[in-house]
Image (cartoon, rainbow, N blue to C red):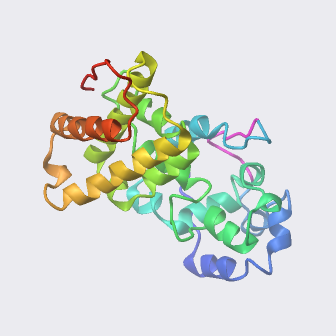
């Protein structure tokens, strides 16, 4: 794995000249790659197979990029200079397919800042680093399927963003694991007919309210000191009460702990 790096002065120049360079962002050729002699190579073999649903390959791409950059140190994994160079050179073609400027909603300059650099949400919105962090925050080699939680996370793009962009959750793996176990539990409850199928809005509200619960309860009892089992039991009590409160339990069916 090559460790390419963009000089900070060059980063500031690029970020300050986005408006001037808008036409270049619509080119299929990477002007920065040509300038720095860094050819397009796509070493992680990222792909976009459905231009009508560009997020369809996010799970596969997240696993691919994490596998290729698995030994990436944290000093680089959260560094704007590093990912900015990759979005503008080696993965330019992928970025043009996944995040085309022509389809930007709203201000194209802000779109470029967010997806090609680090915007207000930092590394969690960048077109490449977001994929790496999806796996970094969910990968568990102790499981039969190490990507079990990654798959749960990426079932819904809104949920994925809502989860990893939560500063408290993304920095606490015990809380994150408890959250994924809870989502898995809710899914099994739905399959068993114990509760009604949650709508997209209800699922998003569930994650939002769970994150809020973590944040509020963390002020009293730090989740870091809990074992995975203790965190799971604590969240079991809360989620059962939550589901009952929103009225999705089907009468005469007894819920089970997850």
Residue 63 percent across, percent down from the top left: 53, 37
Left/right placement of residue 61 relative to residue 162 reads: right
Q: Residue at x 34, y 25 (%)?
A: 143
Left/right placement of residue 249 relative to residue 16 reads: left
Q: Residue at x 37, y 61 (%)?
A: 167
Residue 69 seen in the figure: no
Q: Quadrant of residue 107?
A: bottom right
Q: Quadrant of the C terminus?
A: top left
Residue 43 included in the magenta stretch of the image: yes
Residue 20 percent across, percent down from the top left: 80, 81
Along the line of sight, which residue is nearer the eye, 207 or 94? 207
Residue 3 percent across, percent down from the top left: 53, 56
Left/right placement of residue 83 relative to residue 189 reads: right
Q: Quadrant of residue 16?
A: bottom right
- Residue that protrudes farthest toward the front in the picture: 251
Left/right placement of residue 51 relative to residue 167 reads: right
Q: Quadrant of residue 13?
A: bottom right
Q: Residue at x 68, y 77 (%)?
A: 14
Residue 249 seen in the figure: yes
Along the line of sight, which residue is nearer the eye, 228 or 69? 228
Magenta: predominant secondary structure element?
loop
Provide the residue span drawn in magenta. 40-49
* Vertical placement of residue 9 versus 59, above or below: below
* Vertical placement of residue 107 versus 210, above or below: below
Residue 168 percent across, percent down from the top left: 32, 59
Residue 191 included in the magenta stretch of the image: no
* Vertical placement of residue 110 versus 72, above or below: below
Along the line of sight, which residue is nearer the eye, 179 or 56? 179
Along the line of sight, which residue is nearer the eye, 218 or 37? 218
């Amino acid at each position: 794995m090559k460790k390419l790096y963009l000089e900070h002065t060059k980063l500031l120049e690029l970020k300050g000249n986005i408006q001037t360079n808008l036409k270049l962002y619509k080119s299929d050729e990477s002007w920065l790659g040509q300038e720095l002699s860094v050819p397009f190579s796509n070493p992680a073999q990222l792909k976009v197979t459905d231009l009508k649903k560009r997020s369809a390959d996010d799970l596969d791409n997240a696993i691919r990029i994490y596998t290729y950059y698995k030994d990436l140190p944290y000093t680089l994994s959260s560094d704007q200079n590093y990912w900015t160079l990759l979005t503008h050179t080696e993965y330019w073609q992928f970025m043009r397919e996944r995040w085309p400027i022509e389809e930007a909603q709203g201000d194209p300059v802000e779109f470029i800042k967010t997806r090609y650099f680090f915007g207000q949400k930092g590394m969690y919105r960048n077109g490449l680093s977001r994929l790496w962090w999806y796996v970094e925050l969910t990968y568990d080699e102790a499981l039969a399927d190490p990507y079990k939680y990654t798959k749960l996370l990426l079932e819904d793009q809104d949920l994925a963003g809502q989860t990893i962009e939560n500063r408290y959750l993304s920095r606490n793996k015990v809380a994150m694991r408890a959250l994924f176990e809870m989502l898995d539990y809710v899914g099994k409850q739905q399959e068993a007919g114990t509760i009604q199928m949650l709508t997209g809005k209800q699922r998003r509200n569930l994650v939002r309210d769970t994150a809020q619960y973590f944040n509020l309860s963390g002020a009293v009892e730090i989740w870091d000191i809990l074992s995975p089992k203790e965190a799971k039991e604590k969240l079991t009590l809360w989620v059962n009460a939550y589901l009952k409160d929103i009225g999705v339990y089907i009468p005469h069916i007894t819920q089970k702990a997850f």
